[in-house]
Amino acid sequence: MMLAVGKRLKVRQPVLLSRVLLAMKNVGELISYHGGCHCGAVRFFVLVSEYLAFDCNCSICRKKGFLHLIVPRESFTLLSGADVLNTYTFNTGTAKHTFCRICGIHSFYYPRSHPDGIDVNVRCLDGDVLSLFKIESFDGANWEENIAQIRGS
């Protein structure tokens, strides 16, 4: 498996993002990104193999503006800030919504949908990478009826 550091490429001719992503998927390439909270106290490293994120309409995600990139735990490393993380839980208490107690930013959490994974907020990745991701809507307001749609992700 190849490992490359996420960089913005200068492209002289237009390239369809779908072709780039298909090529990456075919070679099994993992791209590394760094990210964190607004104040910089929380920093992480994540390996991304699939450029798919979910925009959930549940009460908490709507208010936070969280764009969900769900990765296996082994693809995520918390580099700093464990000592400044607070956790918020509600409803079933399964999801552990972590946030920086200094700046309040929710850069990642432990999701109910994928309890063995990490859910990274795409908006908290360093650089201008949001446009690389395909964003799909998820009806989290009706979570029980729709969760099967993303459980395979």
Image (cartoon, rainbow, N blue to C red):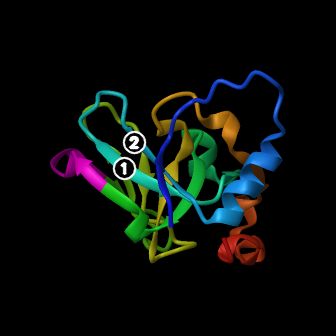
User: Label 2, on which residue?
Assistant: 34
Which stretch did the figure color magenta? 78-86
* Circle 1: residue type: Phe
SS at mark 2 in the image:
strand
Closest to the observer, 45 or 42: 45
Residue name at image x 81 percent, y 48 percent? 19
For disc 1, the marked residue is: 45
Residue 149 drawn at (x, y percent): 76, 72
Q: For this rendering, which residue is in front, 35 or 87?
A: 35
Does label 2 or label 1 sit earlier along the sequence? 2
Q: Which numbered disc covers residue 1?
A: none
Disc 2 to disc 1: CB gap under 8 Å: yes
Neighbour class for label 2 at 10 Å: few (<14), some, many (≥20)? some
Magenta-drawn stretch contains 110: no
Identify the residue at image location x=59%, y=39%: 65
Q: Give the CA separation, mark 2 to mark 1.
A: 4 Å
The answer to whether residue 69 is left or right of residue 77 is right
